[in-house]
């Protein structure tokens, strides 16, 4: 995934992350009482460049999903926490070839038609069913609570049914 | 009339001069309090400052009791901290009024803090409200408004904002992409969420 670094505190983040194991991307909402998501993606910086507008762009690769324990705000307003990685269905090889019918092609055309998404997902892995499902869950306009439920409660099959109902109108 | 006016002017000047004369006296009293814990000197200080402090604090607090508390607190600070007064650095009055100002600020701060405590009990429900069922399929990012505002930004800035904060698509974008009416997308989202709940029962985070 390509991330644009346009805030000073994120430059500090990069500096710290390169000295350590990477950093964690966590989804959040600015609604009160609902911003406590206790998981995130531990990512590694695999490439960087300067965009046309001079803004630093980095490509990150998700090493694993992590549980975020108690966070604290440290230097530069960045959040720090102890994390532990956990296994998630999106990494389970048994689902790689799960038949997805038209979900793959519709994701492909959605990304292709949207330059922003096209540049965001640098390494497209559309041959992996888990990658396709995870991207759909990312893109669908459902609340963070629902998205989180596919981390904490529901498995790959439920994710597939969910996305199929919305995209393909499968009952 | 003329005599009266003249008299008043003269009187005003004399109060000022009296203050100036008393300045060295105040310093001596403070010194006496600091070095000898002299209660008599403190009584003089109290008689001089107390009415003045009370008058000023009445303008800051509508409550008479609070105004009196400022006097008491200030004067007990003066008693405890008299040794910190340095006549070379400024007048005794300046020092005492600074002590008073700090006391006043502390009290105002305390009142403000208390006010928030009282208020929060009223407005903070003990049990967090259960998320509204409708919310989950309403457009929770308020895209309508947000995207409109973002669209007014110059292209480069738009990409900055969208690139980081808006990974997901709006219902409108999804409808357009799938070539379906917005209503269809909304009802499919609703259906998918309902089915999800049935599959595993309601979950609690």
Image (cartoon, rainbow, N blue to C red):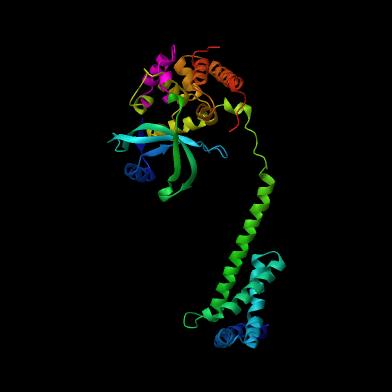
**Which region of the structure is painted magenta?**
A91-116
Kindly indicate the quadrant of the structure image that contains residue B51.
bottom right
Q: Position of residue B44 (x, y in %)?
A: 64, 85
The vertical placement of B191 against B70, above or below, is above
Near-viewer residue (B104 or A21): A21
Q: Position of residue B115 (x, y in %)?
A: 66, 55
Looking at the rendered image, the quarter that the N terminus of chain A falls into is top left
The residue shown at (62%, 74%) is B74
In this rendering, does residue B155 appear at all? Answer: no
Residue A111, image x, y percentages: 38, 21
- Could one spot residue A114 in this view of the protein? yes
Front residue (pair B26, A68):
A68
Dividing the image into 4 quarters, which one contains the C terminus of chain A? Answer: top right
Task: Write the residue at 69% across / 71% down.
Answer: B68
The residue lying toward the viewer, choosing from A69 and B43, is: A69
Specify the quadrant of the image occupied by residue A95.
Answer: top left
How many numbered tags mark residues here?
Answer: 0
- In the rendered image of this protein, does residue A152 appear above or below residue A126? below
Who's the residue at 37% across and 32% down the image? A63
Magenta span includes B68: no
Specify whether residue A99 is painted magenta. Answer: yes
Using the rendered view, name the quadrant where residue B154 is placed.
Answer: top left
In the image, residue A64 lies at what x, y percent?
Answer: 40, 32
Residue A147 is left or right of residue A53, and the answer is right
Q: Main secondary structure of the magenta part?
A: helix
Residue at the outermost right position:
B64
């Amino acid at each position: 995934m390509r991330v644009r670094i346009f805030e000073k505190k994120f430059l500090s983040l990069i500096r710290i992350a390169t000295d350590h194991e990477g950093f964690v991307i966590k989804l959040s909402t600015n609604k009160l009482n609902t911003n406590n998501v206790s998981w995130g993606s531990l990512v590694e910086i695999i490439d960087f460049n300067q965009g046309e507008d001079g803004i630093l762009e980095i490509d990150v690769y998700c090493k694993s999903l992590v549980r975020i324990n108690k966070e604290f705000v440290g230097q530069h307003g960045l959040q720090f926490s102890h994390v532990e990685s956990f296994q998630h269905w999106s990494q389970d090889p048994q689902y790689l070839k799960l038949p997805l019918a038209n979900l793959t092609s519709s994701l492909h055309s959605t990304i292709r038609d949207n330059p922003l998404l096209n540049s965001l997902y640098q390494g497209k892995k559309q041959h992996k069913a888990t990658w396709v499902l995870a991207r759909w869950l990312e893109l669908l306009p459902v609340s963070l609570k629902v998205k989180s439920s596919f981390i904490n409660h529901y498995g790959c099959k439920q994710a597939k049914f969910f996305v199929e109902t919305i995209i393909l109108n499968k009952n | 009339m003329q005599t009266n006016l003249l008299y008043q002017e003269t009187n005003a000047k004399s109060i000022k001069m009296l203050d100036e004369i008393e300045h060295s006296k105040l310093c001596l009293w403070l010194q006496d309090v600091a070095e000898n814990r002299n209660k008599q000197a403190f009584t003089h200080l109290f008689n001089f400052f107390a009415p003045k402090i009370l008058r000023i604090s009445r303008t800051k607090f509508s409550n008479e009791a609070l105004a009196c508390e400022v006097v008491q607190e200030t004067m007990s600070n003066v008693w405890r901290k008299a040794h910190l007064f340095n006549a070379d650095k400024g007048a005794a009055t300046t020092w005492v009024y600074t002590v008073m100002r700090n006391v006043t600020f502390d009290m105002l701060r305390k009142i403000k803090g208390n006010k928030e405590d009282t208020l929060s009990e009223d407005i903070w429900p003990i049990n967090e409200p259960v998320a509204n069922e409708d919310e989950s399929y309403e457009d929770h990012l308020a895209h309508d408004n947000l995207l409109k505002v973002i669209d007014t930004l110059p292209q480069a800035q738009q990409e900055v904002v969208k690139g980081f904060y808006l990974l997901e698509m709006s219902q409108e974008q999804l409808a357009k992409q799938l070539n379906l009416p917005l209503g269809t997308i909304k009802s499919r989202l609703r259906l998918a969420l309902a089915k999800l709940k049935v599959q595993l029962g309601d979950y609690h985070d």
